Image: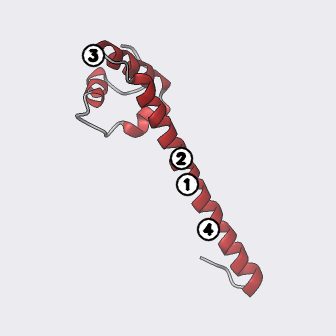
Amino acid sequence: MSRSCVITDEQLVSFADGETSEIEDHIFTCDECQADLALLWDDLLEVNVAEPVLRAIRVDWLVSGMLSTGVGVASRITSAAVHYLTGRTGT
């Protein structure tokens, strides 16, 4: 496997085997690692779980990002409301 990122084959195999999750954040954003994981899982397992697993990872990443953005927006709205209603700066 050849990727342009810094993840080694050993790290990817360890992740695929469920032995480590330390590269999880990288896997969410790296198309090359996701493609190599799909190949690994396809070769190692009788049932092809690569597509559903990667889809679930992407959905989880998307929901996490949306919640984070929502909390940030709500915080800014609250600060603006405090400022405009009371004249104080909300922190």
Q: Earlier in the sequence, mark 2 or mark 4?
A: 2
The residue indicated by pointer 3 is 44
Looking at the picture, which amino acid does disc 2 mark? Val
State which quadrant residue 2 falls in. Answer: top left
Measured in 3D between alpha carbons, the distance from the residue under mark 1 to the one under mark 2, in whole angstroms, is 6 Å
- Residue 42 placed where, x, y %? 35, 15
Above or below residue 63? Residue 42 is above
Looking at the picture, which amino acid does disc 4 mark? Ser
User: As drawn, is 26 to the left or to the right of 67?
Assistant: left
Looking at the picture, which amino acid does disc 3 mark? Leu
Q: Earlier in the sequence, mark 2 or mark 3?
A: 3
Looking at the picture, which amino acid does disc 1 mark? Leu
Q: Residues within 10 Å of mark 2 (few under 14, many from 20)?
A: few
Of the 4 image quadrants, the one containing the C terminus is bottom right
Measured in 3D between alpha carbons, the distance from the residue under mark 2 to the one under mark 4, in whole angstroms, is 18 Å
The residue indicated by pointer 4 is 75
- Give the numbered dot on residue 63: 2
Q: Is residue 4 visible?
A: no
**Colour scheme in the image?**
secondary structure
Secondary structure at numbered mark 1: helix
The residue indicated by pointer 1 is 67
User: As drawn, is 85 to the left or to the right of 37?
Assistant: right
Q: Are marks 1 and 2 in contact (CB under 8 Å)?
A: yes
State the residue at coordinates (44%, 19%): 35
State which quadrant residue 72 falls in. Answer: bottom right
Measured in 3D between alpha carbons, the distance from the residue under mark 2 to the one under mark 3, in whole angstroms, is 29 Å
State the residue at coordinates (38%, 27%): 6
- Residue 68 placed where, x, y %? 55, 55
Secondary structure at numbered mark 3: helix
